[in-house]
Image (cartoon, rainbow, N blue to C red):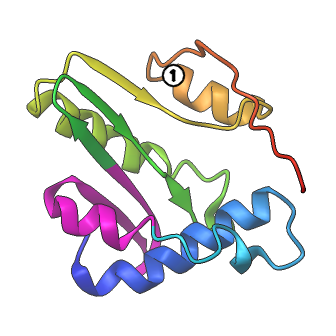
Amino acid sequence: MRENDLEEADTILRLSFGTFMGLQDPMSFFGDADFIKSRYTTDPSSAFAIEVDWKLAGSNFVTNWGSVGFFGPLSIHPNYWNKGIAKHLINPVLERLSKLEIQYAGLFTFAQSPKHIYLYQKYDFWPRFLTSIMTNNF
């Protein structure tokens, strides 16, 4: 990934997650949270992007916590869903995790999505815990 990709990568992240979640305004997903620039500036060598026809189509990031590493958020522009693009963002991430010599690797994904579970199982990632996020509207 290049620094000049950050704005477009942020747009793709919000659009892809918001579309998947069925939001009326997909771009509102994550609110004002920064998932792209902060990960990129922490370690640019752990930020990955893919282009299709010279346009940014998706991104993925590695986070290194010493012996533990995880990746994500992995996002693909909805125009490129179900076209095999994700594997081009998973393979370099796994190579990066290997170079970092981490002992445990993980990721977060949608527990309700067989498509996402199946994708990561192809890379030998298996569900361990299904986490419910609870809120209370006071």
Q: Position of residue 47 (x, y in %)?
A: 27, 59
Residue 46 vs 4, above or below: the answer is above
Question: What segment is highlighted magenta in the picture?
Answer: 35-61
Image quadrant containing the N terminus: bottom left
- For the point 85% across and 68% down, which residue is it? 23
- For the point 28% across and 44% down, which residue is it? 63
- Determine which quarter of the picture holds residue 49: bottom left
Taking depth in this image into account, of 50 and 41 the one nearest to the observer is 41
Q: Position of residue 67 (x, y in %)?
A: 18, 22
Horizontal side, residue 21 vs residue 31: left or right: right
Q: Position of residue 62 (x, y in %)?
A: 29, 46
Crowd rating for badge 1 (residues with CA inside 10 Å; few <14, some 14–19, many 20+): few
* The stretch drawn in magenta includes residue 40: yes
Q: Secondary structure at mark 1?
A: loop
Q: Amino acid at mark 1?
A: Lys
Residue 96 vs 78, above or below: the answer is above
Query: Could you tell me if residue 104 is visible in this image?
Result: yes
The residue indicated by pointer 1 is 122
Taking depth in this image into account, of 45 and 92 the one nearest to the observer is 45
- Determine which quarter of the picture holds residue 106: top left
Q: Position of residue 87 (x, y in %)?
A: 44, 43
* The stretch drawn in magenta includes residue 129: no
